[in-house]
Amino acid sequence: MVSEYEIKKQICDIGKRIYDRNMVAANDGNISVKISENEFLCTPTGVSKGFMTPEYICKIDRQGNIIQANPGFKPSSEIKMHLRVYDKRPDVNAVVHAHPTFATSFAIAGIPLTQPIMPEAVITLGCVPIAEYGTPSTMEIPDNVEKYLPYYDAVLLESHGALTYSDSLLAAYHKMESVEFYAELLYKSRQLGGPKEFSKEQVERLYEIRRQFGMTGKHPANLCQNKTNGCHSCNGSCGGNCGGHDDQAELIAKITKQVMEQLGK
């Protein structure tokens, strides 16, 4: 079993990676790891992620209360967003928030990353929506992110940055890398006249590869999507039970209508 100290070292290592890769500036960004159902390690506020050491890392509970923090350090002001992810996604063990330049540029422009243009992005991410703008450090951001959590493993934050999460810290970080690489390629291909998108059939073949790999997380290959929500559809892979983002009341109304029609009423 990995010790808390080793996990703190891993958080510092990932912090240095996002800093060195120009995914954050100054004291931006934050990282957290779930170590038990009620304990989380997280980066402190007001500290550069490129210069952290294990004693910087704080421990909190599920309500955000400080369990342990060395003098001069307190949890990131964005920890509310992380805790919302853990609350709505029990499969998640780590969260990374950063401001990678290309991905954040799309977030500022209000453009989600939904075009299927490269196999790796389609397989690993599916697509990346934009959560509506919220004031940093308030409950607005977690509230706006929440509706996307059951369906995606990465979300852009309008005019803010990107959020990725997974079953391990390394996997969450790799998703951040993938989001930024996807955004950079999409940006550059647009300068060359626009990307050539995959067909629905090609997307479905990539989805099937993902299913064969048995990859963890949430993805259009496993969860049916509505086209109106800005992501390529499942192309029937859900067996026809489409409507992952339908409002519950609307879904119930649809089912009721179908039943009544079948009964001839």
Image (cartoon, rainbow, N blue to C red):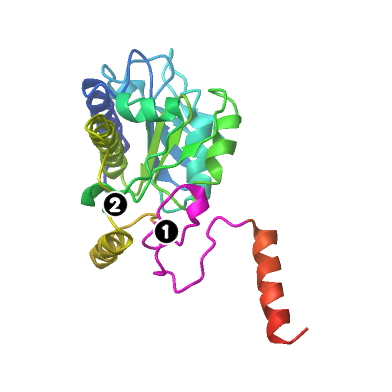
Q: Residue at x 51, y 70 (%)?
A: 241
Q: Secondary structure at mark 1?
A: loop
Q: Residue at x 43, y 17 (%)?
A: 73
Q: Are marks 1 and 2 in contact (CB under 8 Å)?
A: no
Q: Is residue 161 above or below residue 149?
A: above
Query: Mark 1 or mark 2: which is in front?
Result: 1
Residue type, mark 2 in image:
Val
Left/right placement of residue 142 relative to residue 182 reads: right
Residue type, mark 1 in image:
Ser
Left/right placement of residue 8 relative to residue 239 reads: left
Q: Which residue is mark 2?
A: 122
Judging depth in this view, the residue of 5 and 120 nearest the camera is 120
Q: Which residue is mark 1?
A: 233
**Numbered range of the magenta stretch:** 220-246
Residue 128 x %, y % = 39, 43
Residue 101: say if magenta: no
Q: Residue at x 39, y 57 (%)?
A: 220
Residue 12 x %, y % = 27, 27
Q: What predominant SS class does the magenta segment belong to?
A: loop
Task: Spot the residue most to the front.
Answer: 193
